[in-house]
Image (cartoon, helix red, strand yellow):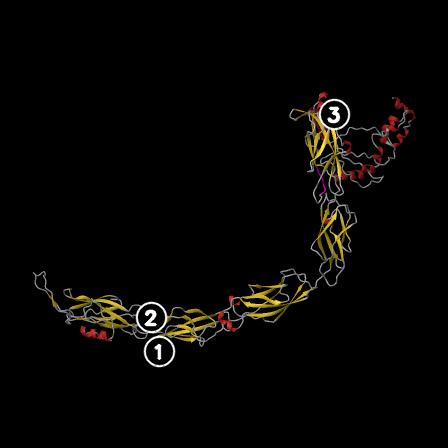
Amino acid sequence: MRTYSLTLLLWSCVFHAIHMMPSQKRTNKHSRSGRITGLSENGGKTLHRVKRGWMWNQFFLLEEYTGPDTQYVGKLHTDQDKGDGNLKYILTGDGAGSLFIIDENTGDIHAVKKLDREEKSLYVLRAKAIDRKTGRQVEPESEFIIKIHDINDNEPKFTKDMYTASVPEMSGVGTSVIQVTATDADDANYGNSAKVVYSILQGQPYFSVDPETGIIKTALPDMSRENREQYQVVIQAKDMGGQMGGLSGTTTVNITLTDVNDNPPRFPQSTYQFSSPESAPPGTPLGRIKANDPDVGENAEIEYSISNGDGSDMFDIITDKDTQEGIITVKKHLDFENKMLYTLRVEATNTHPDPRFLQLGPFKDMALVKISVEDIDEPPLFSRPWYLIEVDEDAKEGNIIGQVVAQDPDITKNAIKYSVDRHTDLDRIFNIYSENGSIFISKPLDREETPWHNITVIATEINNPKQSSQIPVFIRILDINDHAPEFAQYYETFVCENAKAGQLIQTVSAVDKDEPPRGHRFFFELAPEFAVHPNFSIVDNKDNTAAIMTGRNGYSRSKTSTYLLPIIIFDNDYPIQSSTGTLTIRVCACDSRGNMQSCSAEALLLPAGLSTGALVAILLCIVILLVLVVLFTALKRQRKKEPLIISKDDVRDNIVTYNDEGGGEEDTQAFDIGTLRNPEAREESKMRRDVIPETIFQIRRTAPLWENIDVQDFIHRRLKENDLDPAAPPYDSLATYAYEGNDSIANSLSSLESLTMEGNQDYDYLSDWGPRFKKLADMYGGEDSDRD
């Protein structure tokens, strides 16, 4: 190591020789002598400035020292130091005591730690010398600099570990792609440690790099994305100007060739075949064709069109933007019988051509498309889309009014039969001949009732009934003059008793259901028998109306209260139709201004003492009484009858007693005794007896009982029937079974069959019946007992 103990002048020369920065201005570089005059505390003695005696320089130190001992920096010395150890050197500032230490006796400075210029390249310290005895500074504190010299200890580093770039394909040589940048942390002002040179390690011969700027450029012309799209380039940055021993760093650049429209579309085949049934409606897709374009994005967008061909007006092609396919569709209805094969010339064109590559050729391609039409069994075809038939309303039944024509459009030309859709002709007014389609009338027509008839005719193939078609037929009924005109309304006409001759009392008009082509024209005149009428006359107004005029002065209700005036109305159509309408004219009392006050009908009622209002009131009262009688009768019929059991308590566990004793065995009118002897007869009319039935339930048939049935078995069967009977009451009741069983061997014991004369009876046989009948034998056994 070098120890700097030179004079200030010598240090200055050395510093400039090695191109180092001078120390700061505060550092005293020269020893100056001078005198400063002034007052002091010693009575104004003159003070002389003492010559400064620092002897030290700016120090330099290499970074990254790795030796075993501390690194010697330099030595501080002042000319005041006599070597007797009386002075003490003190160091302060950047790193003093931690990085740098000073020997306070000798002024030697050492670096105790390894220094890194990239962390800190300059340290500013201050030094002073103190007299140990007095503690006074022998020299003013002064600054000095320790500068760290750089070594090449840092390799170049790129700003990114990986770069991504793109360049259009087919670019020329030297096209700039991207610029990479590497930085070196070493001192660029000291040697070549920070001088970086770029080179390419991977990516040749496609790309190159500028050694000074790091700009990557294309090195080959016309690179095609379709051949190769991705490239990986490795760039090296080396310091020391690229010389041996320099440090280096690398980075990776991924370069993508972007697409340009440099490829035209191409069909993979020159001819395509498709087929379509002739029944396909317009818009039906038939198939897809696709031209291949190796470009991507909008450069691969294709537009399909039909350039020419005999089917350009029958078919269309649209472009599927998602798949870039051309879809061939039906444009018009096809007909196998008319044309069976069509040929189209389809063209595929790029929608975004690049003018730079037009010299490569046209950016379109053509293909031939053949479409064959398939025959199908078509329904019959009518000669018109609809038919209009006009017929006079007086046409006779069976007259043919028109004809529809349909034929099979297929080559087979199947036979056709015709029919009328009866949903459109519910009244069956029309019919059709199934062989030739002639429509005829089945019922009379009436234009005034239905002026139009809209029916549907069906044509069906005889060999294939599924093939049918319909056509609307509009039938217009033409008018003929078959209705006579009549009064437009009912006229209530009156004439005042004080009317004058020639006075207008009524204007009448007429209507006609017919509709003549020239419009209506009506004529009015009186009936021939009243042609010369002494009381009234008629005047035709020539506008389809007529005026009724009085024929004399004054009319009398007492003589004639009502006049009947027959009027004949004619029309002007052919044949002429006429009708006679009778106008009723009442004679009424009027005031002086001609306002009606009363007429003959009211006057006739007044003498009887009853007016019209009174008659109406009487009739209204009669109607109200009739309604009340009907309502009372209906309510009485609907009143419910009271049940036999009317107790409000729970009706369960009740016994119903019937107090009808009957008339005995000889009373055949009150009860059929045969029912008791024949159980089967009871099945025919089994009714509930606890309540009076409101509804007759369906009689439930039971199994017949034979003649010699056991009584116990009979009781059990009847009990089971009542348990299962849905019409039985829902509570406990007592059912009585009037069945006496089979004939007893003891014959009948009833006294009803006994003779009236007791003497004729013999009761001795009772004694033979055993002890059970002993009591009866004693009572009826002998005459003595009877007497007793």
Residue 271: percent from left, percent from top: 62, 70
| CA separation in Å, label 3 and label 2 | 146 Å
Identify which residue, 636 or 606, lies in the foreground: 606
| CA separation in Å, label 3 and label 1 | 155 Å
Label 3 belongs to which residue? 560
Label 2 belongs to which residue? 185
Q: Is residue 461 above or below residue 710?
A: below
Q: Is residue 436 magenta?
A: no
Q: Secondary structure at mark 3?
A: loop
Name which residue type carries label 1.
Answer: Gln
Q: Is residue 646 above or below residue 403?
A: above
Residue 97: percent from left, percent from top: 25, 66
Residue 210 appears in which quarter of the rendering?
bottom left
Residues drawn in magenta: 510-514
Residue 518 appears in which quarter of the rendering?
top right
Identify which residue, 297 or 329, lies in the foreground: 329
Which of the labelled discs sits on residue 243, or is there none? 1
Residue 465 appears in which quarter of the rendering?
bottom right
Side (left or right) of 42 relative to 253: left
| CA separation in Å, label 1 and label 2 | 18 Å
Q: Residues within 10 Å of mark 2 (few under 14, many from 20)?
A: some
Question: Which SS does the magenta portion mostly show?
Answer: loop
Q: Earlier in the sequence, mark 3 or mark 1?
A: 1
Name which residue type carries label 2.
Answer: Ala
Residue 196: percent from left, percent from top: 35, 74
